[in-house]
Every structure is written in C-alpha cells, then in structure tokens.
Amino acid sequence: MTASAAPAVVPPLTWLYVPGDRPGTVAKALASGADAVVIDLEDAVATDRKSYALRATAELLAEPRPAGSTPALHVRVNALTGPRAATEVRLLAALPALAGLRLPKVGTAADVGRAAAWAAAACPGRAEGVPPLYALLETALGVENAYAVATAHPALCGISLGEADLRAELGVRDEDGLGWVRGRTVVAARAAGLPPPPQSVFTDVRDTEALALSCARGRAMGFLGRAALHPRQLPVIERAFLPTAEEVERAVEVVKAATARAGACALPDGRFVDAAVVAAARRVLALATRRPR
C-alpha cells in the first residue's frame, strides 16, 4: 500500500435528462452546471417528434467540442428492440461531440453486443473505437442479468436502474420493494469493475427535501450521483454525494498513515487501515476536490 498511487477517478455526479426535440431546453441544460446532459430520444419525446429529435441532436453533436468540455453530452436512444434504435446508434456513434450512448431497457448481454455492433459499423475510422455505452436496467430480466450485462462488452462503461418502468413491471408500491434490486445493481457494477451506479431519477422535481433524503439513502447503499429531471435538483444531488468535512478529515488521516507505513496498520483511534480502506479514502479525497454549488 502506497500513498503515491494514482488518484481515484470521480465519475459524474449529476446527469440531467432533457428532451431531444426541444433545442432551446437543451441549450439551457448545457448551461445548467450538470456534469452530463442526457439528450433523450426515448420516453420524453412523442412518436411524431422522434425524427425531428434525432435530426436536432445529430446537428448539435456534429460540432466538435474541446477535450474535457463540460457538460459531457450523452444520448438515450430508443428501445433496442424497436425500429428506431439501430438508425439512431449508427447516425450518432461517430459524431465528435458524443460522450456516450445510453441504452434503455437492456435485458441481456446480447442487447449490448447488438448496440456495440451498430456503433462499430458506423465509425470504423474513429480513433477511440466504439463510443462509451451505458446500460439501463428497467426490467426484471435486466436485473436478473445485471452482471452479464455489466461485462458484456469493453465499451460498456456503466449500468444504472430505470426505476419507473421497473416499478410498473414488478408492482412495487414503496421504496422497500426496490431495496434488493438496488443492491443487486451496485454489486453487479462493482463486480464488473465499473463505477458505482448513479441513482435513478426522483420524479417530484419540487420536493427537494425528499430528494435529499432519498439521495442520502442511495449513498448509504453504494450509489454515486443521480440522474435529474430539472436543474433545481442538481445542487441537492451534488451536496448529498459530496463528502462532509469530517469524512475528508478521516480520509486524510488514512492516506497519511498509508504514506508513513507500508502494509496494514491501525490508527491511534483503533481504526484498521488496509489497501481497501486506503482506496476508499482516495475516492473521498477525489470527490472533495469538487466545489459545491
């Protein structure tokens, strides 16, 4: 164990969804301060507006952006089993401003492989290969296959839950009914070597107090960050997932102890420190470098 190991990489904390058929709303989202803006071609867009949404999104993503620009631009395509997804993936995959494709209602590893094949065929000259893919688990089958999905393809960079569809399919009426599903998703992501998943959207955009409580529960379960439906939710989410001053202080003590002594050791207050504890402390310190709103 050494303190000079590479610093932890912090994934986005805030993912703001915005309808793809409303360019003005998309423009506002880009100035919202979100870490990632997810342009939605699926649920947020009426059927008769989907073709327009795709054209508008492709036009936006065709304009190159400086490396490391924020927010990162992602697109949620339509269901992979439907008639639109293949066209959408093939059109968007090679566009220079695209940071990731979010795949809805993924049920099996084969779903990911199919989307990756569409993307690969569309961008043979793209230096970085297939763009990052993110699988949304929104069905009982998807949850059952969570680990297989999470390890389906090298381009898959994350999994997360889509709880609205899942609640409807499972007949879940309260938060307790999703506890096992949420834990399963966190475990599958980490077992696959992926970042901790972000929480699903909180649909009441006005009740920020309830949102904060929900985020605190999600953080305790191992989630990191959250999808949002409105910019007013962003600072609440960010505050909920940033470490407290006490957590930062404890993390600094752990890293200092690892620097001073190789191998496992105990702090003066009795806390045991090993490689896993140091890795967790580094994640805390990486998060602490962010400035809250």
Image: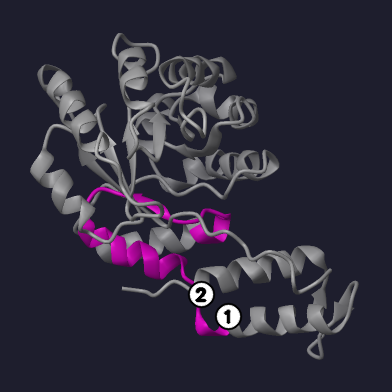
**Disc 2 packing (10 Å; few <14; some 14–19; many ≥20):** some
Answer whether residue 257 is magenta in the image. Answer: no
Q: Amino acid at mark 1?
A: Val
* Drawn side of residue 187 relative to residue 210, left or right: right
Q: Residue at x 46, y 49 (%)?
A: 198
**Disc 1 packing (10 Å; few <14; some 14–19; many ≥20):** some
Q: Is residue 260 visible?
A: yes
Image: magenta residue range: 219-246
- Element at badge 1? helix
Task: Find residue 173 and report its horizontal and vertical position in percent.
Answer: 38, 38
**Contact, mark 1 vs mark 2 (Cβ under 8 Å):** yes
Query: Label 2, on which residue?
Result: 288
198 w.r.t. 97: above or below:
below
Q: Residue at x 38, y 65 (%)?
A: 238
**Marked residue nearer the N-terminal end (1 or 2):** 1
* Drawn side of residue 129 relative to residue 74, left or right: right
Query: Label 1, on which residue?
Result: 248
* Drawn side of residue 19 relative to residue 100, left or right: left
Give whichever of 253, 28 is nearer the camera: 28
**Separation (CA) of disc 1 from disc 2:** 7 Å
Q: Amino acid at mark 2?
A: Ala
Task: Find residue 256 and report its horizontal and vertical position in percent.
Answer: 74, 84
Q: Residue at x 42, y 24 (%)?
A: 105
What is the total number of numbered labels drawn onto the structure image? Answer: 2
Give whichever of 26, 280 is nearer the camera: 26
Q: Is residue 271 visible?
A: no
108 w.r.t. 76: above or below:
above
Task: Find residue 271 and report its horizontal and vertical position in percent.
Answer: 79, 80
- Element at badge 2? helix
